Image (spheres, helix red, strand yellow):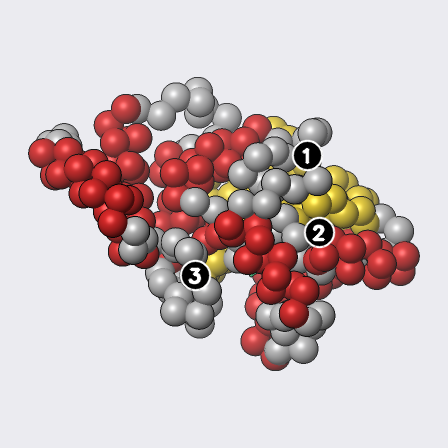
Amino acid sequence: MVKRTGQARRLEAFYQQSVDPWGFEIEEYEQERYAATLAVLDRGRYEDVLEIGCGEGAFTFRLAERAGRVLGVDISETAIGRARSRSVEYPNTSFIAMDIGAALPQGKFDLIVCSEVFYYVRPFSRLNIARRLLERLAPDGELLLVHSHRSETTTWPDVYGEGGAEGLHRLFTHYLTMITVTSRAMDGYQIDLLRPNPEFNGIIRPIEMARLAVANTRAVVTHDVSEAARAILARTQSLGRRTTFQ
Ligand SMILES: C[S@@+](CC[C@H](N)C(=O)[O-])C[C@H]1O[C@@H](n2cnc3c(N)ncnc32)[C@H](O)[C@@H]1O
């Protein structure tokens, strides 16, 4: 059972409004995005695949054709219910309702797909989730990231995409030092296929953490309108401004 945070409630309500609320199965843009994403995968087949934020499974079922098993997780129980009811046609797929901010499935995966998801995760949780995703990758596994270049949205509240795809993907390449296998700047979005850096020791320098906190603070202030939150964040920000970075 997923704990109903504000974002979880909003996403659940969005899925309850209609089937395929984003138009993933019908929009031409999405079909092209899925084709371009699959084209970046450099192996013909992956044995164990995890897709986080899989929604109703639109991309999961496409992935299933290139995989031994695909596990899809999403915060919306409605979306997962719909994905499960379609999965009879794809017996190598399974689905779990789960908030990636709270937990991730156990096991190691040869491919982890994270497409259009990181915006919905609160900025302060992102690096932790990124770390946990890296821990779930097999040593020769690959991480596939797909996010929009846009850094803001006016249509969806509380989505913090500061820096757009570039900023989000940098969490993995800069802080976790993951190695880029393929990088494609598409019209409107970015696809990056990454692999773990075997020399990464899991340590992120405090100066890097401070940089990230300051960057996140600015992003939150942009979107958060509560007075109390502004006061706290303004204090953190002024601390940030006093910090000198080498
Ligand atoms: C824009 S949709 C992308 C769907 C699919 N990955 C794609 O690229 O077509 C974002 C999905 O992420 C899910 N999501 C957002 N926050 C999540 C979280 N904390 N844990 C799990 N799923 C989440 C949403 O419910 C939604 O289905």
The image position of residue 79, as x and y in percent, is 70, 58
In-image side of 174 versus 114 (left or right):
left
Camera-side residue of 209 and 67: 209
Q: Is residue 36 above or below residue 106?
A: below
Q: Amino acid at mark 3?
A: Pro
- Residue at (63% x, 57% y) in the render: 12
Q: Which residue is mark 1?
A: 105
Label 2 with label 1: CB-CB less than 8 Å: no
Residue on which disc 2 sits = 77
| Nearest to the observer: residue 51 or residue 82 | 82
Kindly identify the residue that appears in the image at 28 percent across and 44 percent down.
229
State which tag comes first along the sequence, 3 or 2. 2
**Residue type of the residue flagged with mark 1:** Pro
Q: Position of residue 28 (x, y in %)?
A: 61, 79
Q: Does the image show residue 64? A: yes
Report helix, strand or loop for mark 2: helix
Count of numbered circles on the image: 3
Disc nearest the viewer among 2 and 1: 2
- Local packing at callout 3 (Cα closer than 10 Å; few below 14, some 14-19, many 20+) is few
Mark 3, ligand 1, within 8 Å: the answer is no
Quadrant including the N terminus: top right
Q: Which residue is mark 3?
A: 157
Name which of mark 2 and mark 1 comes first in the sequence.
2
The quarter of the displayed image where residue 3 is located: top right
Residue appearing at x 67%, y 77% in the figure:
26
Instruction: Work out whether residue 109 or residue 156 is closer to the camera in this orientation and state it.
Output: 156
Q: State the image quarter where residue 78 is shown.
A: bottom right
Q: Residues within 10 Å of mark 1 (few under 14, many from 20)?
A: some
The type of residue carrying mark 2 is Glu
| Residue 238 as seen in the image, left or right of residue 176 | left
Q: Residue at x 48, y 58 (%)?
A: 147
